[in-house]
């Protein structure tokens, strides 16, 4: 289909982080954008403030007059149930219905497309890369899965010739993209409700990697079983970071590229995983032809992403960090960063599990990653698109955590619990609606030092 002939874009699930980036994009193009979401959030409020119509009740009465199959495209999130009445109206009336990845594929097929894949690190790597390219004057638009602090948006740039997209492995949607240059940050088992086993998800990443015709334009961590340029920290590779030190809570490091050594790069985001994400973005930008000095300058000014090791309070006696981590590997990365920065301080992790299936599939790994913290508070599982699984509860997960200082609480009880701990470093973790509680948690913690 030709998106230039589309006048209206209707979103079912418009408040999702990836969907809202597309909504912003079409709004910038002058299309009439509106849609449905299950709940009102800061993101949906912002879309409405930009002039988009958003409603929260599933009813075809909210579909504007004049939205017809000839002039309208409908974009649907996979989280919406097939019983959704608006979705069924559009199907019955033969509207063009696209998944988010299909829409991204159409938008980016005529651009030079950077695609960032991986079970962890997609949002951070693509945001760093987008920031580097925007700051270097490249005619780029980056569609991101997080709100970049520098721009307060998940859509940065407004270019027409280059695109940066997250290549999401969920339901194999990344196979709809047309990447010219890509990376795979990681291939851990996840989304086993879709794939069934870890071999199937690895096969999908192999299939994605083959979409990049030139293996010198595919970037992978050293050790990943794919054919591309190797990225590593403190070991030989095509791009390798070394001489790594921390100065005033900032990484300073050197990078060996195939052609040069880049010295004294500064990067603010803590944790070895973020250092790897920065190195991956540097390698892609450098290979694309971005000048070295522009890359170094942009890395030094990147301020991070909301809900990715996002500081809420950072004082001498109290630290509060919020993070989107929802997989055991990601929780381990958060813990490593916290311990590196605050080695002798008491830490409390407040975790909201995301999805019954993920909790079931990785329960032992979740228990081990959470047990590392000094205190652990569990909230109930956030179901998202799923129905409960018998026996899979936060209480069951709690029983597996080998830590004496652990507790399962309701959202309302959480604020009381915060008053009864002497921890000095707090981390909220999870991909559900715990992000909506951050402001209230922040206020309650401020009471402890006021």
Image (cartoon, rainbow, N blue to C red):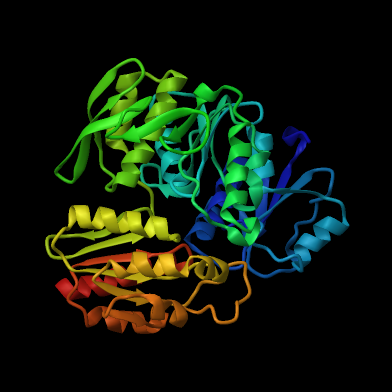
Residue 203, image quadrant: top right
Q: In front here: 310 or 260?
A: 260
Q: Is residue 116 above or below residue 99?
A: above
Residue 71 place in picture, x, y as percent: 80, 43
- Which residue sits furthest right? 93
Q: Is residue 424 above or below residue 49?
A: below
- Which residue sits furthest top? 259
Residue at left offset 37%, top offset 29%: 282
Query: Does 420 sit left or right of 29 as displayed?
Result: left
Residue at left offset 39%, top offset 32%: 231
Residue at left offset 21%, top offset 57%: 339
Residue 422 place in picture, x, y as percent: 17, 76
Residue 241 place in picture, x, y as percent: 28, 32
Q: Is residue 299 above or below residue 346?
A: above
> Which image quadrant: the N terminus?
top right
Q: Is residue 255 above or below residue 127?
A: above
Q: In front here: 243 or 322?
A: 243
Residue at left offset 62%, top offset 50%: 200
Residue 230 place in picture, x, y as percent: 42, 30
Q: Quick check: can you spot residue 429?
A: yes
> Which image quadrant: the C terminus?
bottom left
Q: In front here: 238 or 154?
A: 238
Q: In front here: 368 or 107?
A: 368
In the rendered picture of this protein, how many numbered marks are placed on residues? Answer: 0
């Amino acid at each position: 289909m030709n998106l230039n002939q589309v006048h209206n874009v209707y979103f079912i699930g418009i408040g999702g982080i990836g969907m809202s980036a597309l909504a912003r994009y079409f709004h910038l193009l002058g299309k009439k954008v509106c849609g449905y979401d299950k709940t009102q959030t800061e993101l949906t409020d912002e879309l409405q403030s930009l002039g988009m119509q958003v409603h929260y009740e599933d009813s075809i009465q909210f579909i504007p007059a004049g939205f017809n199959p000839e002039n309208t495209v409908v974009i649907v999130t996979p989280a919406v149930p097939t019983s959704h009445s608006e979705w069924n109206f559009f199907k019955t009336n033969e509207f063009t219905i696209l998944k988010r990845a299909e829409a991204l594929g159409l938008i980016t097929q005529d651009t030079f497309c950077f695609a960032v894949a991986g079970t962890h690190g997609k949002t951070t790597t693509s945001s760093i890369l987008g920031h580097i390219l925007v700051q270097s004057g490249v005619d780029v638009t980056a569609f991101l899965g997080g709100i970049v602090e520098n721009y307060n948006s998940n859509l940065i740039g407004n270019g027409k010739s280059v695109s940066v997209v997250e290549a999401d492995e969920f339901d194999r949607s990344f196979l709809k993209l047309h990447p010219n240059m890509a990376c795979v940050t990681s291939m851990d088992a996840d989304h086993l409700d879709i794939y069934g086993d870890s071999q199937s998800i690895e096969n999908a990443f192999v299939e994605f990697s083959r979409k990049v015709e030139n293996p010198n334009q595919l970037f992978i961590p050293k050790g990943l079983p794919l054919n591309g340029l190797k990225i590593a920290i403190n070991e030989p590779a095509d791009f390798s970071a070394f001489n790594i030190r921390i100065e005033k809570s900032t990484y300073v490091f050197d990078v060996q590229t195939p052609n040069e050594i880049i010295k004294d790069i500064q990067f603010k985001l803590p944790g070895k995983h973020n250092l790897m994400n920065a190195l991956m973005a540097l390698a892609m930008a450098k290979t694309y032809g971005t000048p070295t000095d522009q890359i170094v300058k942009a890395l030094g000014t990147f301020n991070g992403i909301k809900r990715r090791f996002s500081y809420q309070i950072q004082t001498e006696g109290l630290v509060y960090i919020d993070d989107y981590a929802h997989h055991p590997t990601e929780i381990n990365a958060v813990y490593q960063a916290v311990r590196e920065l605050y080695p002798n301080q008491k830490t409390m992790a407040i975790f909201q599990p995301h999805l019954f299936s993920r909790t079931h599939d990785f329960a032992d790994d979740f228990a081990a990653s959470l047990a590392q913290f000094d205190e652990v508070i569990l909230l109930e599982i956030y179901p998202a698109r799923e129905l409960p699984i018998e026996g899979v509860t936060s209480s069951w997960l709690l029983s597996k955590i080998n830590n004496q200082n652990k507790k399962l609480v309701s959202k309302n009880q959480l604020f009381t619990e915060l008053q009864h701990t002497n921890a000095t470093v707090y981390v909220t973790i999870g991909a559900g609606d715990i992000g909506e509680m951050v402001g209230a948690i922040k206020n309650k913690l401020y009471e402890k030092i006021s």
